[in-house]
Every structure is written in C-alpha cells, then in structure tokens.
Image: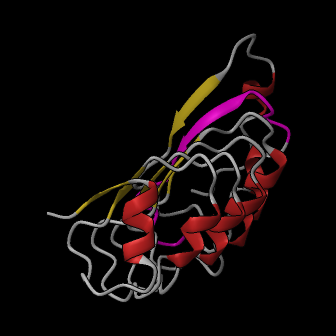
C-alpha cells in the first residue's frame, strides 16, 4: 500500500520526529511536503526509496537517517537542508564521496558506517560545525582523512 499523505503532521502544535523505517512502498518523500514542523526523519531500510528531494522543503529538519537505502539517486538535497545537524547514511554501497554533505553548513555529525565504496571524505572539510564522523567498516586510506582527523573526531571500528 502506497503512503499518500501525512496531512495530520501539518496540524501538530510542536516539532515532530517520524520513523518510517522498513516501509518498502516509499519511493520518495514528496508526501512529507508541507510538514514544516518535522525535525527528525528515519527512513532507514526503505529499500525502494529513490528520491529525497523533498527534504529541502523541511525548514526544521535537524536529523535524517537514510541507512540501507540502496536506491537513492542523489544525496545533493542533504546539502540544501538549512539546519541539518546529523545524517546517517550507513550501509549504502553507492556512496563514493562526501561532496553533497560538504554543502551543509550546520552539519555536526555524519555516520557513514559500512559504506564499502567510499573513497573520498574531503567534502566534509567544508562543514564548519562538524564534530563527529563514524567511518566504521570503511577503508582507512580515504582521500581527505588526515585533514578530517584534525577537524573532527573520526571513529573507526
């Protein structure tokens, strides 16, 4: 069953966190359009999620979990989220670099755990508030890693 609308979210009087993990019918986040109170979205393990373009229209979004979403076509919208502080994109084999995340000036924490094709983290150097990066189960010879370690706490496990 395809999710059509979360109109009720627009009416909530305070900020909202929503967990839609493992819902295979989600292909995009357009149905969240107008949910301007959303601060946190978890769409991990939404195996058919292709587009996250709608996140740019969520002015209060501070946390976004896109782990195990292997079909996302572009992470560029993440860089256009005005107040995003944390993003989890673990276990996504198509992530090769962090350029899209570098455009997010409010980003403090990035989890890239288990991204086997990641080879360049230099894009994160452009994040002035970055404090924590989890690169567990990633290669250790990443482009930009030495500089990143001077800027933020980098976790390998």
Q: Residue 147: x percent and y percent?
A: 44, 71
Please identify the residue farthest to the top as the structure is shown.
13
Q: Does the magenta stretch include residue 66?
A: no
Query: Residue 35 versus residue 1: which sits nearer the camera?
Result: 35
Q: Residue 141: x percent and y percent?
A: 29, 87
Taking the spot 67% from the left edge, 45% from the top edge, the residue there is 106
Quadrant for the N terminus, please: bottom right
Vertical placement of residue 127 versus 85, above or below: below
Q: In this view, does 69 lie to the left or right of 80?
A: left
Q: What stretch is highlighted in magenta?
A: 34-49
Vertical placement of residue 151 versus 147, above or below: above
Q: Residue 64: x percent and y percent?
A: 55, 48
Q: Residue 53: x percent and y percent?
A: 76, 64
Taking the spot 80% from the left edge, 54% from the top edge, the residue there is 56
* Colour convention of the picture: secondary structure
Quadrant for the C terminus, please: bottom left
In which quarter of the view is residue 68 placed?
A: bottom left
Secondary structure mostly seen in the magenta stretch: loop
Query: Residue 100 versus residue 152: which sits nearer the camera?
Result: 152
Q: In this view, does 99 lie to the left or right of 21?
A: right
Taking the spot 81% from the left edge, 33% from the top edge, the residue there is 36
Query: Residue 13 versus residue 122: which sits nearer the camera?
Result: 122
In which quarter of the view is residue 9 placed?
A: top right
Please identify the residue farthest to the left as the structure is shown.
157
Taking the spot 58% from the left edge, 61% from the top edge, the residue there is 26
Q: In this view, does 36 lie to the left or right of 62?
A: right
Whether residue 67 can be seen here: no
- How many marks do you count on the picture? 0
Whether residue 91 can be seen here: yes
Q: Is residue 48 magenta?
A: yes
Query: Residue 93 versus residue 157: which sits nearer the camera?
Result: 157
């Amino acid at each position: 069953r395809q999710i059509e609308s979360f109109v009720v979210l627009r009416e909530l009087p305070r900020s909202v966190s929503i967990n839609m993990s493992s819902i295979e019918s989600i292909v995009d986040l357009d149905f969240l359009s107008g949910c301007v109170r959303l601060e946190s979205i978890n769409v991990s393990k939404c195996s058919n999620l292709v587009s996250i373009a709608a996140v740019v229209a969520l002015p209060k979004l501070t946390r976004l979990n896109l782990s195990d979403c292997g079909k996302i076509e572009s992470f560029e919208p993440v860089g256009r989220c005005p107040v995003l502080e944390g993003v989890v994109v673990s276990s996504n084999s198509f992530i090769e670099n962090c350029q899209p995340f570098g455009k997010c000036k409010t980003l403090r924490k990035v989890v890239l755990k288990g991204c086997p094709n990641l080879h360049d983290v230099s894009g994160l150097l452009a994040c002035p508030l970055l404090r924590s990066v989890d690169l567990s189960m990633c290669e250790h010879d990443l482009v930009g890693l030495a500089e990143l370690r001077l800027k933020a706490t980098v976790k390998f496990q």
